Image (cartoon, rainbow, N blue to C red):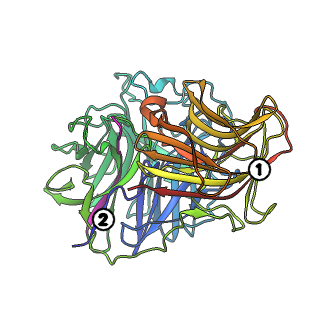
Amino acid sequence: MNTFKNPIMPGFYPDPSICRVEVDYYLVTSSFEYFPGIPIFHSRDLVHWKQIGHVLDRPSQLNLDGVKPSGGIYAPTIRYNSGAFYIITTNIGRGGNFIVTAKDPAGPWSDPCWLEDESYAQKPPNSVIPWADKHFRYEDEPVLFVNAPGIDPSLYFDEDGRVYYTGNRKPEDGKQHWSDREIWLQELDMKTMKLAGKKYSLWKGCGGAFAEAPHLYKVNGCYYLMIAEGGTFHDHAVTIARSKNISGPYESNPRNPILTHRHLGLDYPIVNAGHADLVQTQNGEWWMAALASRPYGGYYTNLGRETFLMPVIWEDGWPVVSPGTGCIESEYSCPGLPAHFWPASLSCDHFESQSLGVCWNFLRTPREKFWSLTARPGYLSLSLRPQMISKWENPSFVCRRLQHISFSACTAMEFLPDKPNEEAGIALLQNNNYHFRFIYTMDKGNTFIKLIKRKGGSEELLAERQVNTRRLYLKVEAHEQDYSFYFASGYENWELLADKADGRILSTQVAGGFVGAYIGMYASSNGESSENVAEYDWFEYNGIF
């Protein structure tokens, strides 16, 4: 029997949302402070996925200037109706809730249609972005959304042609714990793209903290409201309620939660299960895409929250997730759909295209062209700029997600530092205060390979070696939480610089936040001007199994 393995999207792909158009399936995930925003994927069998682009790929669509780590784009929802695709999402820190549309899911997508009268764009935020911290309170968040409060909005296209917005907000009855939220609904006028009419309070969930991520479905004449609650980490859960009327009242499923791993203990191999979306295949099967994490080396999740797939059946008018176990399994039988494979993506990018591949991201919105694939054909050229990854800036950093518990990444770089402030090489990033910089730099007139660990805002030199070469090979090899760093002046003549550095600083449990770790090519002049350039011949990334 054909089977597939979870996660279907390894690495930092949280908050999945999925829709079907005839035999084609499309899936999007959160992207937080990374640009381009909202990766979008295509599948025909729910198992094999191909990234077809990013939804927010222009600065006019996505302002991430100065956003704090784990700010930016939260929890997009994708829906299709009458020949058009719709994505609604939240830009935490730069604008609030908005909608973009497209005829082709590969793009181009429209500029944002904002759903607020007042927003961050008019009143810049100056308070706390929600960290992965049990002491964080949502009222600390600078939510100034007037017409569309809350995060994780969703759209529902009803059979009568009316369209509804759902989101979360503080309960309006005034009787609340600081973590209480309720799901609310209002009609959306598609001609003006404005919310109109009465606001309805739908449901507060089952008592878990932070009711959010609402999605509406209609099954056998009944409306189902599925949400996430319990926070985004170990107590995360998926719950569901139903009503004969879209505006309620909603009755809670007596068997809630329909998905959680919070009762399985910290040693379970899959944790943080929650934030889900449902899809029905053309054959009538139901499947759920949800986020979860895989801890390793202890309760540490360097890869962040990933996308998993599980079967769903209906019993007594309620969905049953992963029947027989009720948990996300590492392997399932494939959906009853024809297998559809995509060409395998190459593990090594030789930078021979005219544009960067879809796997590459920047940190925040690039406002100037600091990279080039044409200045030296066959190379990625990075300008050394004053911006640094240790600040909330847009540094010269071209990066990709870590996607494997154990991996190897290497590159060939041509660069010669001219001044002590200049550095270039590889960076492994969780956020500005937690990362590794594996760099070639100058110190007291000599050039060195250095490995710098930044933890909690303090930097430590883990190892250094004096070298004198323009072409340099760099390699990072991770075996779970043991990260080793190698260099060479000739290909494959590797010399060990640092052995088994502790990779746990790249986990959210140490660094906080909601994102997974990234790796990529980095160049900086550390606050000073520079005309220097680092040129990368290729970059290769492989999982180690």
In this figure, which residue is indicated by the disc labeled 2?
4
Q: Along the horizontal axis of the image, is 32 left or right of 421? A: left
Q: Which residues are magenta?
A: 285-298
N-terminal of the pair, mark 1 or mark 2, is: 2
The reply to whether residue 388 is visible in this rendering is: yes
Q: Along the horizontal axis of the image, is 353 left or right of 329? A: right
Tag 1: amino acid = Arg
Above or below, comparing residue 335 to residue 315 in the picture: below
Disc count in the image?
2
**Residue 113 rendering spot, x and y as whole percentages:** 61, 51
Please identify the quadrant where the C terminus is shown: bottom left
Nearer the observer, 317 or 335 = 335
Nearer the observer, 299 or 85 = 299
Q: Residue at x 16, y 44 (%)?
A: 255
Please identify the quadrant where the N terminus is shown: bottom left
Q: Residue at x 31, y 75 (%)?
A: 337
Q: Residue at x 59, y 24 (%)?
A: 457
Which dot marks residue 489?
A: none
